[in-house]
Amino acid sequence: MKKMISLLLCAILCIACFAPAAMAADTKVLKVATNVAFPPYEYYEDEKAVGIDIDIIQAICDKLGYTMELSDMEFGSIITAVASGKVDIGFGAITITEERAKSVHFTTSYSTGIQSIIVKEDSPIASVDDLQGDKIKIGVQQDTTGDIYATGDFGEDHIARFNKGADAVQALLTGKISAVIIDNSPAETFVAQNKGLKILPTVYAEEDYGFELSYDNEALYNEVNGALEELLKDGTVQKIIDNYISAD
């Protein structure tokens, strides 16, 4: 009898020990990547990554039953990480373009943005046309559409590339460059945080943002894109955007 009780206790202990491991094995993880330096879409607050994109991805994970595993990497490495299968989703206010779509599968657009131009308040630059000139140097975040468009419009010799938009802004403040071309939302954040800067009242370019997934996992793409479309339809995405960007 004692032997049977001992065996029963051992069995119960074994089940208790292995149950958490089994549950962990069943946990669905969504590996995502961004460059956490692009407010208000992704940035650090009290050492925690927050922002529009991160909240939307978290809403998708909640809807589908995934746990999000976030990697912070250079912007130019995101597409490669997605295309190679290193991560499941790439994001970072990434503009949907035909060239990028050759490498990754974009979701439905979840937000529309514009490229803006930041200059010093006393700058003689008043429009896009004023960016032409031998002495003009334009700062951009490397591998962004701001980089791509500006290089095409003004030439390689007039472009100064930085790993982060904030670094480009600092170069503008110290007089190393003449202007910064970047998405309007982070542009507004940078101008608010740094005295002596302004955004020109002109739109340099308009674009749509999407999340990136690999063409090799169509099932995951359909799952994520379907969840995103539901969140767009029920107003969740707009509520998230409104939480970070004032309608005014």
Image (cartoon, grey):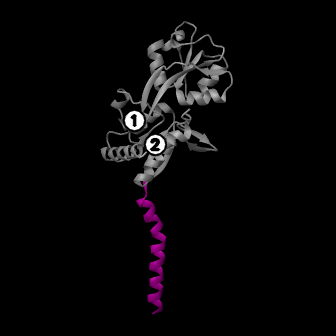
What's under tag 2, amino acid-wise? Answer: Val
Highlighted magenta segment, given as a residue range: 1-28
Q: Assign a secondary structure to mark 1.
A: loop
User: In the picture, residue 89 is in which quadrant?
Assistant: top left
Q: Quote the CA–CA distance across marks 2 and 1.
A: 11 Å
Count of marks placed on residues: 2
Q: From the top left corner, tell me how far across and down residue 247 is, in percent.
A: 54, 34
- The crowding category of the residue bearing disc 2, from other C-alpha atoms within 10 Å (few below 14, some 14 to 19, many at least 20), is many
Q: Is residue 180 above or below residue 1?
A: above
The residue lying toward the viewer, choosing from 234 and 25, is 234
What's under tag 1, amino acid-wise? Answer: Ser
Q: From the top left corner, tell me how far across and down residue 237 is, in percent.
A: 46, 42
Q: From the top left corner, tell me how far across and down residue 108 is, in percent.
A: 37, 37
The residue lying toward the viewer, choosing from 78 and 201, is 201
Q: Residue 219: give its label.
A: none
Please name the residue that numbered disc 1 is placed on. Answer: 109
- At x 58%, y 28%, the residue is 188
Q: Assign a secondary structure to mark 2.
A: helix
The residue mark sitting in front, 2 or 1, is 2
Please name the residue that numbered disc 2 is placed on. Answer: 237
